[in-house]
Image: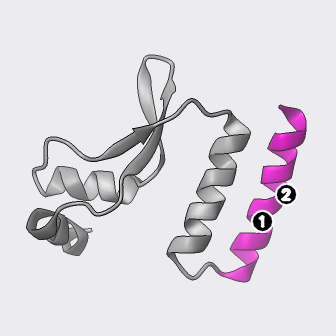
Amino acid sequence: MKELADTVRKSGIYQAILARPKEEHLQIVFGARRYCASLLAGKETIPALIREMTDAEVLEAQLVENLQCRDVHPMEEAEGFPNRFFCASSS
C-alpha cells in the first residue's frame, strides 16, 4: 500500500473510484485500494463516480473490475460467478 500511496502522492489518481449511496454514506464499489492510498498520501479528495446501483449490479461491477485489473486465479473467478447469478435472480 505504501508504494501505491507514494505513486498517488507523486502522480495522482488516474482512474476514478466507483461508489454508490448506501444509507447516509457512500459505499465504495471498486477502488478501495486507491482510496486508502489517497488517504495515506494525504489527499483530501479523490476522483469518484457516484451511481445508484443494486446489490447485483455492485457484484457484477466488482467482478468485471477484478477480472480487468489483475490476474485472477481461475478458482476465484469460478467462485464469483455463482454469487452474481444468485444476486441477479433474487433481485
Instruction: Provide residue 13's location: percent of width, then percent of height.
Output: 25, 60
Residue at image point 24% right, 59% down: 37
Q: Which mark is residue 82?
A: 2
Furthest toward the top, the residue is 24
Instruction: Provide residue 73's location: percent of width, then percent of height.
Output: 66, 81
- Type of amino acid under label 1: Glu
Residue occupied by mark 1: 79
Residue at image point 83% right, 42% down: 88
As displayed, is residue 69 above or below residue 32?
A: below
Residue at image point 68% right, 33% down: 54
Which residues are the magenta region?
73-91
Mark 2 element type: helix
Say which quadrant the C terminus sits in. Answer: top right
Instruction: Provide residue 20's location: percent of width, then percent of height.
Output: 50, 33
Packing grade of label 1 (10 A; few <14, some 14-19, many >=20) is: few
Instruction: Provide residue 21's location: percent of width, then percent of height.
Output: 49, 26
Left or right of 27? Residue 55 is right
As displayed, is residue 49 above or below residue 34?
A: above
Mark 1 element type: helix
